[in-house]
Image: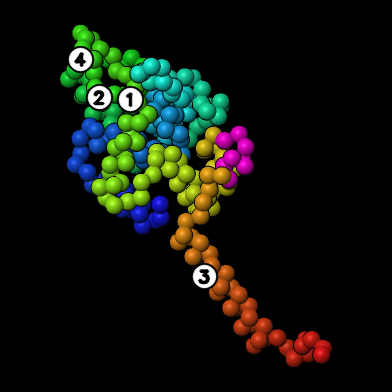
Amino acid sequence: MEDSQLAVLLQKLFSLKENGTTVKNQLFFYLALITGARSGELLALTWNDIDYTGKKITISKDIYTKGTKTLVQNRTKGMEARTVYCDDFCIDLLNKHKQYQLEWLKSRNMANPNLYVFIKRTIKQGSHPEAELPSRSSFHHFMRKFLIKNNLPVIDVHGFRRMAASYSVNNQVPLTTVQTMLGHKSLSTTMIYLRTLNNSRKESVEALSNTYKQLMEGTSEDKPEGDQPKQ
């Protein structure tokens, strides 16, 4: 997905009519873009993982499926916990989502004892049900429909992780920093995720072309006669 396409995606996504479901989806995909975290790591987030003052998020858990239930395991795919950073816009989304979540839980007399950031919106019959995690596919289905509706290339949730890596490198973030952000043990794994955007490649060619032209012009105009090579 190129710059112009990502611009359309973000503009359309954040112009949707605000409600609890919309904010939840906006938050999930913005977190994927700003942190590069895996979808399972995002789904496993709990509210005590968020440091609002430091604008930091602890990634220490992942999800797994048992039967029809989505459960949390206290380790990431990379095995090690890490800290990722977010911006003010992300913090605002987190606060907004939390408020919607609290209102939704209260209206259904539900508890969220595990402090899940993302919860399933369908509930089972019962007197005091507890919030459960959504399936990994829930956000994928939303984004697929959204992309098709807006005539954009269909990518999966993991595509946002790749974009986070690509844009970080294109903005001169050191590869070792990107490696830490993504939670890769090996830098060679990080390299697999990287791709250059067409616009950046074009700019690179233009920069090289201009440099070579200047050098050639300087050679033909400024080189002293005494330095001409002997025939």
Q: Are marks 2 and 1 in contact (CB under 8 Å)?
A: yes
Query: Along the polypeptide, which appears first: circle 2 or circle 1?
Result: 2
- Helix, strand or loop at label 4? It is loop
Neighbours of disc 1 within 10 Å: few (<14), some (14-19), many (20+): some
Query: Along the polypeptide, which appears first: circle 3 or circle 2?
Result: 2
Q: What x and y, as percent, mark residue 152?
A: 32, 51
- What stretch of residues is rendered in magenta? 184-191
Kind of residue sitting beneath label 2: Arg
Image side of residue 212 versus residue 7, left or right:
right
Q: Are marks 4 and 3 in contact (CB under 8 Å)?
A: no
Neighbours of disc 3 within 10 Å: few (<14), some (14-19), many (20+): few
Q: Quadrant of residue 227?
A: bottom right
Question: In this rendering, is residue 80 above or below 4?
Answer: above
- Helix, strand or loop at label 2? It is loop
Q: Is residue 51 visible?
A: no
Question: In this rendering, is residue 186 above or below 191?
Answer: above
